Image (cartoon, rainbow, N blue to C red):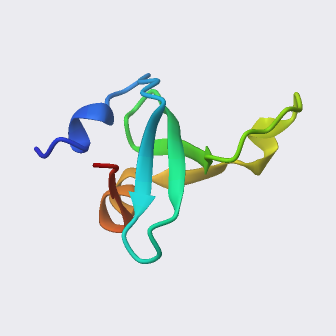
Amino acid sequence: MNEFEKFLVPYGVPNIIIVNKLNNEESVLYAVDSKGENALIGSVQMKNTKDWFKDCELVTKKMLLEKFRLRM
């Protein structure tokens, strides 16, 4: 288990910055589902609206580990 996987625990709310391996775009890893199989990620850009979560994306753990890394 690598450092990144340690944050992907069921019901986790890590709120950490992750980086896309292809384009170095930063995102926030907000939460992990109850089974630890999916995660909610979103833009690092500050959203000053109550609907910020509508811009988030639900991704699988596998995809997250393949396409993202922890920010160093």
Residue in the image at 42% along x and 27% along y: 14
**In this view of the protein, which residue sits in the foreground, 47 or 39?**
47
Depicted 10 relative to depicted 57: above or below: above
Q: Is residue 69 left or right of residue 22?
A: left
Depicted 58 relative to depicted 68: above or below: above
Residue 44, image x, y percentages: 61, 46
Residue in the image at 42% along x and 58% along y: 19
**In this view of the protein, which residue sits in the foreground, 59 or 53?**
53
Corner quadrant of residue 4:
top left
Residue 23, image x, y percentages: 47, 75
Residue 46, image x, y percentages: 73, 39
Residue in the image at 44% along x and 42% along y: 17
Residue most extreme to the bottom: 22
Tell me the quarter of the image containing the N terminus: top left
Corner quadrant of residue 47:
top right
Residue in the image at 17% along x and 41% along y: 3
